[in-house]
C-alpha cells in the first residue's frame, strides 16, 4: 500500500445516495483474485450501455471529470454486500479520496485497509463541493493536518482515528503491520 500523507486532486461529484457495492462493481466481474484491473468495471451499468458504448449522461464519462482522483458522493456510500472488490475498483480507477456524509461500515474499513482515504463530512459541505465541482474544483487533502483546502481557499477539517491515520500515512496494510513485529514473532517461534 502506498503512503498517503497529502493528496491534491480534481473532484468528481457522484450525486447519489445509497450507492451499494453491486453498483460500484457488479457481480459478474468478481471472478478475479488480483486487486488490479477492476477500474474498467467501476459503476459498469451506469457508465455503459448494453452494447458497451459509454453513456454520455454519467459523470465519469464527462470529459470535465476525466482524471479525477477525489470522489464526492451521497449518503450511505458503499452499502450492500461486503465485497472488497469495491475499493479495489475505485482505487484501480484512480480514486485516492472519497468524501461522503456517511459510509457503510464494512466498506469504510475495507477502503481504509486498501489505501483509500474515506472522509465523513457534513452533508451541506458535501453538497457545496458537488455544486462547485461543476465549474471545476480541486481539493488539497492534508492527512497529517486533517484538513481539506478547496481551490477557492476555504479550509475544512475532518476526523479520522489516529490508528487509521498512521496506517495511511505510512502505507501500512495489515500484512505490513504484522511484518513490523517480525523480530518478536521470530523470537516467540524460536522460544516455543
Image (tube, rainbow, N blue to C red):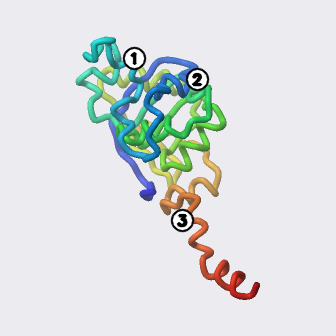
Write down the residue under mark 2.
Answer: 75
Instruction: Give the number of the disc on residue 46.
Output: 1
Q: Which residue occupies the foreground of this view, 167 or 38? A: 38
Q: Nearer the viewer, mark 3 or mark 2?
A: 3
Q: Residues within 10 Å of mark 3 (few under 14, many from 20)?
A: some
Residue 78 lies in what quarter of the image? top right
Q: Residues within 10 Å of mark 2 (few under 14, many from 20)?
A: many
Write down the residue under mark 3.
Answer: 176
Q: Is residue 153 above or below residue 102?
A: below
Q: Which of the image's four quarters has the N terminus?
A: bottom left
Q: Which of the image's four quarters has the C terminus?
A: bottom right
Q: How many angstroms separate mark 3 from mark 1 (CA)?
A: 36 Å
Q: Nearer the viewer, mark 2 or mark 1?
A: 1
Q: Is residue 111 above or below residue 79?
A: below
Work out whether mark 3 precedes mark 2 in sequence or the reverse, and give the earlier one. 2
Q: How many angstroms separate mark 2 from mark 1 (CA)?
A: 18 Å
Q: Residues within 10 Å of mark 1 (few under 14, many from 20)?
A: some
> Does any portion of residue 189 appear in the rendered image?
yes
* Residue 152 pos. (x, y %): 36, 33
The residue shown at (41%, 24%) is 43
Work out whether mark 3 precedes mark 1 in sequence or the reverse, and give the earlier one. 1
The residue shown at (43%, 32%) is 71
Q: Is residue 25 above or below residue 59?
A: below
- Taking the image as shown, residue 48 lies to the left or right of residue 108, namely left
* Residue 104 pos. (x, y %): 63, 31
- Taking the image as shown, residue 150 lies to the left or right of residue 86, namely left
Q: Residue pushed farthest front?
A: 31
Q: Which residue occupies the foreground of this view, 172 or 40? A: 40
Q: How many angstroms separate mark 3 from mark 2 (CA)?
A: 32 Å
Amino acid at each position: 500500500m502506498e503512503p498517503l500523507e497529502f493528496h491534491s486532486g480534481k473532484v468528481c461529484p457522484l450525486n447519489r445516495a445509497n450507492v451499494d457495492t453491486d453498483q460500484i462493481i457488479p457481480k459478474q466481474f468478481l471472478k478475479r483474485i488480483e486487486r488490479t484491473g477492476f477500474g474498467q468495471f467501476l459503476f459498469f451499468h451506469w457508465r455503459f450501455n448494453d452494447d458497451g458504448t459509454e453513456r454520455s449522461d454519467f459523470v465519469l464519462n464527462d470529459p470535465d471529470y476525466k482524471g479525477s482522483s477525489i470522489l464526492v458522493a451521497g449518503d450511505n456510500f458503499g452499502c450492500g454486500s461486503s465485497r472488497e472488490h469495491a475499493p479495489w475498483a475505485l482505487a484501480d480507477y484512480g480514486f485516492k479520496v472519497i468524501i461522503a456524509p456517511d459510509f457503510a461500515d464494512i466498506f469504510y474499513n475495507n477502503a481504509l485497509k486498501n489505501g483509500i482515504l474515506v472522509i465523513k463530512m457534513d452533508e451541506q459541505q458535501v453538497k457545496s463541493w458537488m455544486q462547485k465541482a461543476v465549474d471545476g474544483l480541486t481539493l488539497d487533502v492534508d492527512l497529517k493536518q486533517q484538513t481539506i483546502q478547496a481551490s477557492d481557499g476555504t479550509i475544512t477539517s475532518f476526523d479520522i482515528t489516529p490508528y487509521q491515520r498512521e496506517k495511511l500515512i505510512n502505507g501500512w496494510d495489515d500484512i505490513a503491520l504484522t511484518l513490523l513485529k517480525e523480530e518478536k514473532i521470530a523470537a516467540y517461534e524460536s522460544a516455543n
